[in-house]
Amino acid sequence: MNGLADEDLALLLLIRCFERKLLALFEQGELNGTTHTCLGQEYVPVSLRPLLRDSDWIFSNHRGHGHYLARFDDPEGLLAEIMGRKGAVCDGVGGSQHLRRGRYLSTGVQGQSMPVAAGVALHLRRHEPGTLACAYIGDGTWGEGAVYEALNMAALWRLPLLVVVEHNGIAQSTPTSAQMAGTVAGRAAAFGVRHHALDALDVTAVRHEVAPLIEEMRTDPGPLVLEFRTHRLGPHSKGDDVRPPGAPPADWYAAYRAAHPAQSARIEAAARDRVERVAAEVTARPLASWGGACA
Amino acid sequence: MRVGENLNRALHGLLRDDPSVYVLGEDILDPYGGAFKITKGLSERFPDRVLATPLSEGAIAGVAAGLALAGDKAVVEIMFGDFAALAFDQIVNFAAKSVTMYGRRVPMPLVVRCPSGGHRGYGPTHSQTLQKHFLGVPGLSLFEVTPFHDNRVVLDRMLALGEPCLLFEDKVLYTRPMYGEGAVDELFAWRTVDDVAVVELADGGDPDYTLIVPGGLVHRAVSAMRALLLEHDLAGALLVPSRLHPFDPAGVPGLVPLLARTGLVCVAEDGTAGGTWGEHVAAGLHARLWGTLRRPVALVSSAPSVIPTAVHLEREVLVQDTTIRSAVLEGLHG
Ligand SMILES: Cc1ncc(C[n+]2csc(CCOP(=O)(O)OP(=O)(O)O)c2C)c(N)n1
């Protein structure tokens, strides 16, 4: 694994520690509702972070904590949203999977964001050339028809739509082999949409591969499907992993720690402390107040 | 037995007894057994007829309609009832219409199960109760799971109708017990009149008010009835139909005397006001019992709002036992 700047590693480990803390808070009965952690997939938004601009739109999904933290470095606001406390990003109304902040938006209905992202891309193409709309979707979400309707329009109209597929091999409990005929690559090819697959878990390597593709999208607009072959380490939400125990899936975390033990230990300790402080501070806040539906 | 277990057993029995039945849905295979475990054990016993689907709600409903068209029967699970919106076209514009739009009746034995409702902190897209959006569609019946009605009987009835049916299932009910023969608790008893469960004070007498609610509100309604009795000395009755639509309580002879004697009828439901089941029931009662009702029918819905995720905000929006209690007091004295 290539060495990373402290700042990149700190972000990776912030997300890892944040997600672990959420699962712990659930176990302690401090959280209710549901949540989907991105354990194992943290490197995807961290890799893309310097390649995306503040003016780009991001459409996230149910497994979006890493997407949010990579964009805003705001564990306080996110945890407050999840816990319904003061300072919540969306007043506690949206919760874990319905966030909106500036040009960042997530929704809990799979596939829904793809046509919306295409619409935003249509606007950007005319009014803000060089800016793109990025939509994160999982492999399972390729079951939804809206994905194809959007991809078709994006190809026809040469829209700057970046589709980031986090292909973690499973959708809730269903392995990809049981829910996807063919491949993501084949589906993109059918629409004449450019597709690039990535197996690397190494942030530096990913950036190196992806940077020219994204730059090209900015000057010569058209959709691009980036398929990250990644791994969901945790349960789908919480306590609902029925996969038989087997060899642990590849994890950037273990690989990086093995290659850079001292830096990892130092930065992880700091990230853990930060998350603990944030959790204690947010838990002590009063409940979020909301002006109501019409406010 | 819990309601969820009753439903699970009903599906087991249905698949066992009728080889033409298929069950389809996302993540319904063992060992997962569905997001709410209602399909547990089905795929191990009936692997050929219990199918896990991709995330494709529209196509799942369409495939179910195709099975029905070809002579089979299908039960579909929509993981969260909110996503029935993605299947709306297949249900409303194909399955329901096909029953009659080809001039001769086309049987469409098909059930779409919709786990619905909030109180679990799942947020705006995973907590809704969408009944009202499917009301009044020719060829489409709406049912709701209740703690009174055995789900095997309900499933058999829906499939025998030969038209698509939506079965709404309040997620909170899954872990609540089915009421045993006769008694709700030490105060209230229940019996059925047609397919309507009628809950009354065990020692009888005319009710001061009568509630009509779908199955998901039963516990909130009973809790309100206890408080109204113990704190306000008001005796209530409660009507809980299995079939929500079509439903015409004033057309059920066994219910008319009760409705005529009561001081107030109040219909409570989840979901926001405006074009709702409750309004439809109230309109029917007003038209048919205008001369006998003592007061206009009172209606209870959730607040006009999305359903927030945070529990304390969700509580302010959704119907609670106290909402029902206040509506009755206001209806009688306000
Ligand atoms: C329209 C719709 N159907 C079903 C669901 C329930 N659901 C939430 S996440 C999920 C699995 C998604 O799988 P995938 O796209 O592979 O993403 P992953 O969870 O693996 O990150 C399902 C079935 C949903 N949220 N929206």
Image (cartoon, coloured by chain):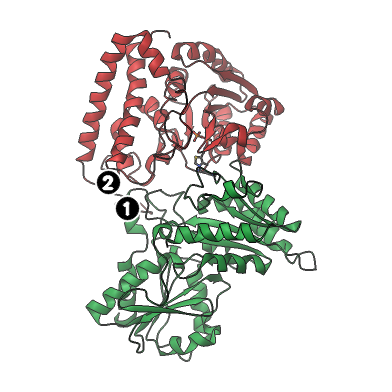
Task: Say the numbered circle drawn on residue A288.
Answer: 2
Task: Say the numbered circle drawn on residue B57.
Answer: none
Q: Are marks 1 and 2 in contact (CB under 8 Å)?
A: yes
Spot occupied by residue A283 in the image (x, y as percentages of width and height): 22, 39
Chain letter, red in picture: A
Which residue is tagged 1?
Answer: B313
Q: Colour of chain B?
A: green
Subunit of label 1: B
Element under disc 1: helix
Looking at the picture, which amino acid does disc 2 mark? Ala
Can residue A4 be seen in this snapshot?
no
Q: Is residue A80 left or right of residue A56?
A: left
Subunit of label 2: A
- For the residues labelled 1 and 2, the Cα–Cα distance comes to 8 Å
Can residue B163 be seen in this snapshot?
yes
**Above or below B124: residue A178:** above
- Which of the image's four quarters has the N terminus of chain A? top left
Element under disc 2: loop
Examine the image and state in which quarter residue A181 appears: top right
**Above or below B170: residue B323:** below
Spot occupied by residue B2 in the image (x, y as percentages of width and height): 42, 61
- Label 1 packing within 10 angstroms: few (<14), some (14-19), many (20+): many
